[in-house]
Image: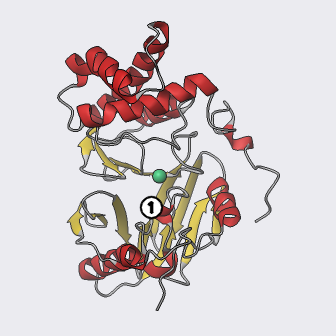
Amino acid sequence: MAENCGLFTRDAQAYLSAPAAMTTGQLSERLYTVTDGNVRTLFIEGERSVIAFDTFGTPGRARSYARAIAAALPDKPIGTIIYTHDHLDHAGFAADLAPGVDIVADELCAKVIKLRGAQGQLQPTRVLTGTLNELTIDGVELQLLNPGPTHGSGNIAAYFAAERLLFSSDTLLANARYGFMPDYHFRNFTGTMRSFLALDWDRFVPGRYELTDRAGFERGVDFIEAVMDACQQAFANFVPIWLYQPMRDFCIDQLAQRFGDMEGFEDHVGQMAIRIVHHYLMGGWGLEDTPEARVLLADQVSL
Ligand SMILES: [Zn+2]
């Protein structure tokens, strides 16, 4: 049977079908985190069902995620999926994870998904608006936060006060192993991420790699701000900002003393810089970097 193929137009069946070895960890009586070694997400035990954030990024990985959930909670089916944002590599394959269940997403995420029409990415059934939504789903009280643009469209973070834990997918990492940042909203990113520090938590679950604590989260914000600062200095120093090697060398020279110990720093900072200089060069990609990004598509798509 042909797999749901996202936006692929040529045969990618082997990639789409490949399973992943999932590693599941229990964070509290009700919270679990699961990773394929790169992408990481969270699921929650409800009274009669499981609430799963996201889907992983292929049909094969979505099925591996379903098996990991079933292994941890064998008596409870997935009842709800919450999309953290619109991207296919995190939320593209609900049709393969658990077709027919409730899907919760931010309004902007839902609108992008509707327009995109990617095969396997199911339309949300419940749409949220605003910066804070307090929901009870299958006996689980949830605080879903969207204080401003960070990454992707309609990014939702989850705050678990009882566990003093924050989950925010595809935003900050405990390392520097992410350089390609096409859908980060730099005008708002670090301010929005710092706003989470007003909440009381000491564990952070990122959308990739390993968990970190409050200090690791703050260092992650500091790192992105420092790269943004170095990129502006590159303009002032007439570094050829569109060339990879000079930008990499300049950023390593500027930042290695403070951030050179971060895993992946030298391999990724050049790519990060190429993306970030274009924020300053062009003013952002389309409407994404307007100060009030919520106006994007607001009255142009009906759900
Ligand atoms: Zn993403």
- Visible in this render: residue 46? no
Q: Amino acid at mark 1?
A: Asp
Q: Secondary structure at mark 1?
A: helix
Image check: 6 left or right of 239? Answer: right
State the residue lying farthest toward the left. Answer: 261
Task: Determine if the C-beta at disc 1 is less than 8 A from ligand 1.
Answer: yes
| Residue 57 spot, x, y in % from top left | 42, 66
* Crowd band around label 1 with a 10 angstrom C-alpha radius: few (<14), some (14–19), many (20+): some
Q: Residue 147: x and y, percent?
A: 56, 40
**On the image, which quarter does residue 24 sit in?**
bottom left
Q: Residue at x 52, y 73 (%)?
A: 10
The residue closer to the viewer here, 47 or 166, is 166
The percent coordinates of residue 96 (x first, y second) are 46, 81
Tell me where residue 20 sits by quadrant.
Answer: bottom left
Quarter location, residue 229: top left
Q: Residue at x 25, y 43 (%)?
A: 212
Q: Position of residue 123 (x, y in %)?
A: 63, 71
**Could you say which is closer to the camera, residue 230 or residue 12?**
12
* Image vertical order of residue 149 relative to residue 139, above or below: above
Which residue corresponds to the image point at 44% horizontal and 23% vertical from the top-left?
228
Q: Nearer the viewer, residue 141 or 211?
A: 211
Q: Which of these two is toward me, 32 or 242? A: 242
